[in-house]
Amino acid sequence: MNTFHLNREMVRLVILQRIELLSLFTKKIRKLFGRYIFGNIIAKYFFNSGEIGKKYFYIMEEEFNTIKDHVNFDNKKILAIGGGMGGFESFLNKKFNNNFYSFVEKNFISKKVKYGWDNENKEAYNNLDLLKIFLLNNEMKESQFEIFDYDKDNLPIKNFDLIISLFSLDYHYDFNIYIEYFKKVSTKETKIIFDTIRPDHYLKVFKNIKILKNNENTIHKSKRIMCSEFIK
Ligand SMILES: C[S@@+](CC[C@H](N)C(=O)[O-])C[C@H]1O[C@@H](n2cnc3c(N)ncnc32)[C@H](O)[C@@H]1O
């Protein structure tokens, strides 16, 4: 079925992670009540989880369409940085069911979500127990994934085929907090895909860069780029 199964708590989180799930009307309500009441009460109790599940699935399908011609997704080790509720990876798993996913995320929800550039990288909107339940409820097997808390855990050390971070790394916080780690867990062939507000900067960081998409209607104007092979 072309939908994701979400409970109320998950609905609240995906709405914070993907504000395009909100209609114009609900965006106005958010303005009226303020982000705190919206994020903690309205987002939890006043949305239809069936509708949000369908919309979330549709958005992830669209994301997949921006990338699918550039990457072979079959039988890969995939690292998701800031994957949110894991919708993109769950979508991938429905199509290619022999991948292994490592999720690195944060395990708290900021009191006031600002959606800006977060110099100190203190903002987050996730719950790793819910992420696990979401993945299991949406066809991923327990043997296919592992979840790491960015603030507490040692990050996984292995060679990944693909590192993906949609609207997270270098969109809300600095790529450099992961750069040394990425150098350890990538090879020349590893593809690194993320949405950045400063694409030109990466001409000095990677040997190969390709622009996959222009993000014009998002909070920050940004580009989705695919990179490989660190310079030096
Ligand atoms: C705008 S959401 C995008 C979620 C998901 N990638 C998507 O496209 O739906 C940004 C995510 O980055 C996470 N995040 C923030 N700082 C992070 C960090 N240092 N490492 C990993 N994830 C982080 C947040 O918790 C949040 O889930």
Image (cartoon, helix red, strand yellow):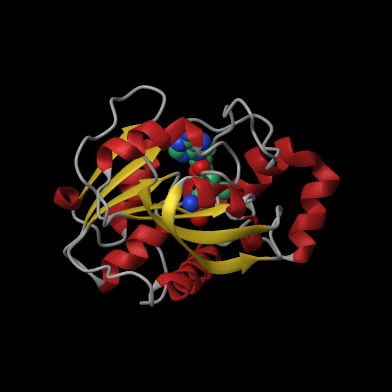
Furthest toward the front, the residue is: 232
Q: Nearer the viewer, residue 125 or 216?
A: 216
Judged left or right of residue 35, residue 196 is left
Can residue 12 be seen here? The reply is no
Furthest toward the right, the residue is: 32
- Total count of labels: 0
In the image, what residue occupies the spot 39% across and 30% down?
150
Judged left or right of residue 86, residue 136 is left
Judged left or right of residue 82, residue 96 is left
The vertical placement of 148 against 100, above or below, is above
Q: Nearer the viewer, residue 155 or 138?
A: 155
In the image, what residue occupies the spot 64% across and 57% down?
222
The vertical placement of 185 against 20, above or below, is above
In the image, what residue occupies the spot 58% across and 47% down?
201
Q: Nearer the viewer, residue 209 or 50?
A: 209
Provide residue 118's location: percent of width, then percent of height.
64, 33
Quarter of image, res 216: bottom right
The vertical placement of 17 against 139, above or below, is above
Furthest toward the top, the residue is: 152
Judged left or right of residue 52, residue 220 is right
In the image, what residue occupies the spot 38% across and 37% down?
128
The vertical placement of 140 against 64, above or below, is above
Provide residue 155's location: percent of width, then percent of height.
29, 31
Provide residue 44's location: percent of width, then percent of height.
59, 46
Give the quarter of the figure containing the N terminus: bottom left
Provide residue 130's location: percent of width, then percent of height.
39, 42
Q: Nearer the viewer, residue 54 or 152?
A: 152
Can residue 225 be seen here? The reply is yes
Give the quarter of the figure containing the C terminus: top left
